[in-house]
Amino acid sequence: MAAVVWANVDFASYDAVAHPLHFWVNDVGMMFFFALAAKEVFEATLPGGALSSGRQAVSPLMAAVGGMAAPAAIYAGLTLTLGPTELLRGWAIPCATDIAFSAMVARVIFPKGHPAIPFLLLLAIADDALGLLILALFYPSGALSFLALFGLMTAAVLLAFWLRRRQTRSFWPYVLGPGALSWAGLYWGGFHPALALVPIVPFIPHGPRDLGLFEPREDREPYPLNEFEHWWAKPVQFVLLLFGFANAGVPFAQIGPGTYYVLAALLIGKPAGILLFSTGARVLGARLPSGLTVRHLVVVGIVASIGFTVSLFFATAAFPGGPALAETKMGALLSFAAAPLALLVSRLLNGGVDPAAERPATPS
């Protein structure tokens, strides 16, 4: 909000303050945000995790794929039909789901313990995993040097493996050694260095099982990967604050086609894709969690339309400074409209307002 107000009052002074932050926030600080996202993805694949078995993972994974494919198709279709075609490079911007804000809105709409909340979180985690892959493959940050990438990345992985073999019980050597080498490999290789800790996270010693999302017992687990999350949880919130400030300052005069394409792709494509692909998963034999109905899926799809953080990051990766970047950034910001829309639709559909009727029975 501060960035938007300041940019619309005096863009030159805002840019003079925000621009120097871009490298330190986007390329360095966001490395820890993506590391925490990678931790959730990795732990969900461990025994007991929601993504640990094919049958268990089909529903949220299919929903995530649909929630990315449909927005990308809508954005690309609008761009190719209405132009300008230079906006096509931003096709991945509406694929994103902001985990933090989506979870916050879901908790307002659905009662505590409702299956829609963990389903949304798993969908968003899978979305982030696919988003990291898209970012690495389709949005290089500069001229590609595979020699630098593979040389330094190989050294990073071998060092992480060696630290794991010698049972290093602190996360710091993994961050300062392999993490730094991985960052340099991505940076000099032409890829986004914010992904540097993603391949290192699985090497940090962790528990043998996934206890579950928001499981209080995890706080007492004495594993370096848990300690990494607890140490960085609050600093990452400050990083996200700076990221929003450094990247969200867009003058309203720069609203244009990119804004409308991103908004349409998010607000229409996300719910449609999630609902369509979840239905397809059920046809293939997958089951929705007990107590989760089609009405809830519609609301979950709208809540997942909040792109904000990752959409902004994709926009900065897709476009250099200019009208295309400003327009698509504004679309990412305005995706917050999904929050009141989801609340309204949930009331109209009665989704999540009657916890006694919707929550599955607990065995006595």
Image: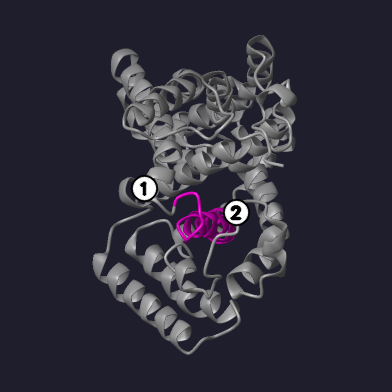
Report which quarter residue 350 is drawn in.
top right
* x and y percentages locating residue 157 in the rendered image: 38, 75
Quadrant holding the N terminus: top right
In the image: residue 231, left or right of residue 27: right
User: Could you give the CA–CA distance between mark 1 and mark 2, rounded to whole angstroms?
Assistant: 17 Å
Examine the rendered structure and indicate whether residue 358 appears above or below residue 118. above
Residue at figure coordinates x 40%, y 76% from the top left: 156
34 drawn magenta = yes
Of residues 74 and 22, the one nearer the viewer is 74
Magenta-tinted stretch: 26-51
> Is residue 98 in sight in this rendering?
no
Residue 181 lies in the magenta-colored region: no
Q: Residue furthest top?
A: 348
Residue that appears at 62% across and 54% down: 21
Question: Which residue is the site of mark 2?
Answer: 212
For label 1, the crowd category at 10 Å Cα-Cα, with few meaning under 14, some 14 to 19 and many 20 or more, is few
Q: Residues within 10 Å of mark 2 (few under 14, many from 20)?
A: some
Rendered image quadrant of residue 73: top left
Quadrant in which the C terminus is drawn? top right
**Which residue carries the number 1 mark?**
54
Q: Nearer the viewer, residue 230 or 331?
A: 230
Element at label 2: loop
Q: Amino acid at mark 1?
A: Gly
Depth order, front residue of 92/42: 42
In this picture, residue 159 sits left or right of residue 220:
left
Chief SS of the magenta region: helix
Q: How many marks?
A: 2
Q: Which mark is residue 225?
A: none
The residue shown at (43%, 36%) is: 59
